[in-house]
Amino acid sequence: MTARTLTFQVASVEDLTPDVFRVRLEGRAEAVAHAPGQYLELKLDDETWVPFSIANAHRGDGSIELHIQHWPERSNSRRLRELMQHLATLTVRLPGGECVLDADSRRPLLLIAAGTGFAQMKALLEAVFAADDALPVEFWWAVRERRDFYLESLARDWAARYPNFTFHAVTEEPLEPGFESERVFAHRGRIDEALAASLDDVSGHDVYLSGSPGMVYACIDTLAPLGLDPAHVYSDVFAYAPRDPLFPSGADASGAAASGASPQRQQE
């Protein structure tokens, strides 16, 4: 899809935690098409466009949802928050990015996110659930402490509604007893360490990752010896922070093949 520059109405701004807020935008329905997993760019001024994952699958109604981490010490973050609170309209460029759901795939899904990387995963998951597909879906979400699961209730609702879905919560701080429930699991530590302790084979999976380059590549280094297929691993990081070779030295044969892969994903 060709990127378009559009004007959106700011429908609502909602604090989800002291550090994360949700923005709902409304535009012309016929102009807002995007694929699940893509991002948009918000215009701060003539020289500054800030990328954010679109946190919803395309609904056909012109609506866009964003999850924005607020960093008071960063000037662009402060400016963005002020714009959201005081402007009725925003200029947006969309869509961008090639880290999108393969709607024709019949492979189980492994989705891995850190922090507000949840936004991109939410859009992917909405599309998967709308397709009424029974393929297994594992969602891993890593944060520092429980309050950073800013939409924990939504992840729990998915686990309750969809028998093929499991939610793996990963935190640095310990989670209280009773956190786990049916298809909801708790892990403590770094996300790559939690994956290594819990998984033994990811061959045959489509794997999507959303987070910092350090987090994404640490997870790839963990998953490569477990059969990760370079043709079926997706992240925006591959475009804006490429690594060659993609897989670590000493990975299995399928991983070694990734050293010749060219990055194709765009920054969030």
Image (cartoon, grey):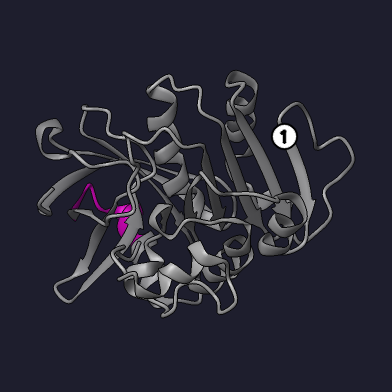
- Tell me, yes or no, if residue 175 can be seen here: yes
Residue 78 shows up from this direction: no
**How crowded is the residue under tag 1: few (<14 C-alpha within 10 Å), some, or many (20+)?**
some
- Amino acid type of disc 1? Val
**How many numbered discs, if any?**
1
What span is colored magenta in the figure?
Answer: 82-92
Identify which residue is drawn at 27% across, 57% down: 97
Location of residue 219 with respect to 35 vertically, above or below: below
Residue 83 lies in magenta, yes or no? yes
Q: Which residue is mark 1?
A: 184
Position in image of residue 214 (x %, y %): 54, 74
**Residue placed furthest toward the front:** 253
**The one of 63 and 126 positioned closer to us in this rendering:** 126
Secondary structure category for the residue under label 1: strand
- Write down the quadrant of residue 8 in the picture: top left
Left or right of 7: which side holds 40? right
Residue 179 percent across, percent down from the top left: 81, 37
149 part of magenta stretch: no
Q: Residue at (64%, 55%) from the top-left corner?
A: 142
Is 236 displayed left or right of 108 in the figure? left
- State the image coordinates of residue 75 (x, y, percent, origin top left): 39, 77
Frontmost residue, 215 versus 109: 109
The residue depicted at 25 percent of the width and 53 percent of the height is 87
Location of residue 49 with respect to 136 vertically, above or below: below
Question: Quarter of the image containing the C terminus?
Answer: bottom left
Q: Residue at x 55, y 76 (%)?
A: 248
Q: Is residue 86 above or below residue 219?
A: above
Residue that lies at the very extreme toward the right in this rendered image:
177
